[in-house]
Image (cartoon, helix red, strand yellow):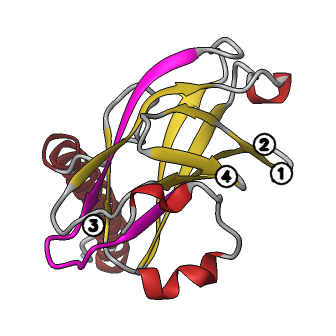
Amino acid sequence: MAKVEAFPKKEKQKLFNGWLVFIIVILSFLLLLLLFLSLRGYFEREVKLKPLNELGNDLKINVSSQGSFVNTISYKGSRLPGDEVFQKVTLVLDETAPDTLVRVRVFLTDLNGSLTDVTIATNELWVIGDGYYYFNNYMTSGSNQIFSQKIILPTEEKYFKADYIYTITFLVETSSLENVSLWGETPEDWFLNIS
């Protein structure tokens, strides 16, 4: 008499292969999930992304003797228009740079891309002209110069939508005396301290 099996050998093999594929897929998924969670934990602990510079926090801008340098600070649109905020901004000239002339422009960009100059409370070493603040002396190699003590936010309503974050841009330009003509027209009383 012939032996009758409930599942022929080929059927058992197909069933086994199906379960094997299913188990491999589940284990692969669990392994990827474990890898993702491990990396996420690592990045949260070890790799700190540099947050945006926030309005009110000290800001240092490193510059060299020739060029343009940009740094930004941000603020929430829930601030009050015309708000005066203590904002220390320090310019730091490279230690190998020769004596350098400096000017700074500070502005906001609205949602349409148009610029608005921002008022800065500086000291008597800065002269205002053509939208820039000109340092009324040379910066010497390795020196620090305080540019700003306070920022006065604009009063236009377009810069104060509560659900937006706005960015104030500091554009610092440096030059030697020989190349300062590239800046175009400068304030008449700018060179008072420069000899």
- Front position among marks 4 and 1: 4
Disc 3 from disc 1: Cα separation: 62 Å
Q: State left or right for residue 151 relative to residue 141.
A: right
User: Image height check: is 74 above or below 115?
Assistant: above
Asked which secondary structure carries label 2, the reply is loop
Disc 2 from disc 1: Cα separation: 6 Å
Q: Residue at horizontal 44%, vertical 37%?
A: 124
User: Image height check: is 80 above or below 56?
Assistant: above
Residue 116 x, y percent position in the rendering? 76, 43
> In the image, which disc is placed on residue 110?
2
Asked which secondary structure carries label 1, the reply is loop
Q: Which secondary structure is most common in the magenta stretch? A: strand
Residue 76 x, y percent position in the rendering? 59, 24
Asked which secondary structure carries label 3, the reply is helix
Q: Quadrant of the C terminus?
A: bottom left
Mark earlier in primary sequence (3, 1): 3
Disc 4 from disc 2: Cα separation: 23 Å
Residue carrying label 4 = 129
User: Image height check: is 114 above or below 81?
Assistant: below
Q: Which residues are magenta?
A: 84-104
Residue carrying label 1 = 114
